[in-house]
Amino acid sequence: MKQTLTIRELAVVVAARNHNPTILNPDFLKYNGIVGQDWKLAEDPICVGPFAHVSFENGVNIIAELGKVSFSQTLADKQLADIVVADIARDYVKTLPHVEYRAVGINPKGDIPISDDEKAGFRTERLILPGPWTQFNECPAEIGIRFVYRMGEDLLNLTIEPMIRSTSDGDQGHILIFAANFHHEVSGSDPGVRLERTIAVIAKWKDLVESYRRFVDESLLKETLE
């Protein structure tokens, strides 16, 4: 049976100078229309010096630090059309036009289940040359791999690594994580130009996530599944 990637999370990370993390709180987000008025907090907000964190019951988390702001959303059974975190990131930076934005990261994360049977499922060893480095004292390596692709102004970092995930009923299953980071530097001396370019990169999130999904499904999984 053909395996396909399940996307579990999307994060948008905006690097910035002159950003004050203490402005991040639920009132600021709702007053400026960045999040819905009816959104409920998952836990009490945190604001301690150069760090602030607000999380909502719908899986959206926002973390502000001195050098960056991270917006993430756990997807569960949601489809790409249900993702709102990119819109939140866009509206947040539009609310703060004078911040010096430096870079944007679009970071999808997905996984596939892997079998305990060595003869079934994804075979990471097909991605590296065979040799004695694949074992130590007759113990096979659990291989984690990082690929870096330069695509014009964008940089894609793709990490593949095994992990154990606990299910809601307490069971544990083996999965293989495919974590991507599309990194784009934002240039320009004028704050307005930086703002426009930052928003333009965030607007590409859907195309980037779809290209990541296709690459994993059609290249990595197709070539490494039996």
Image (cartoon, rainbow, N blue to C red):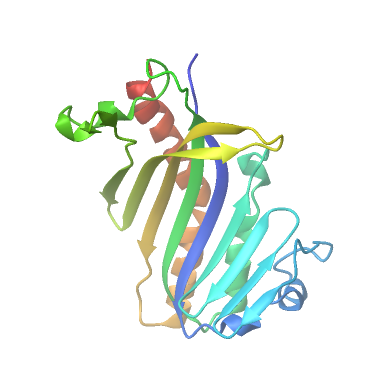
Q: Is residue 129 visible?
A: yes
Which residue occupies the foreground of this view, 226 or 175?
Answer: 175
Relative image position of residue 90 (x, y in whole percent):
58, 65
Q: Is residue 5 visible?
A: no
Q: Quadrant of the C terminus?
A: top left
Relative image position of residue 190 (x, y in whole percent):
40, 82
Q: Is residue 94 left or right of residue 29?
A: left
Relative image position of residue 160 (x, y in whole percent):
38, 40
Taking 61 as reference, is 216 above or below it?
above
* Extreme-left residue of the structure: 131
* Extreme-front residue of the structure: 137
Relative image position of residue 75 (x, y in whole percent):
64, 45
Q: Residue at x 50, y 82 (%)?
A: 99
Which residue occupies the foreground of this view, 88 or 27?
Answer: 27
Q: Is residue 189 left or right of residue 50?
A: left
Q: Residue at x 46, y 23 (%)?
A: 116
Taking 151 as reference, is 196 above or below it?
below
Q: Residue at x 30, y 58 (%)?
A: 153
Q: How many numbered dots are placed on residues in this image?
A: 0
Q: Residue at x 24, y 28 (%)?
A: 138
* Extreme-right residue of the structure: 38
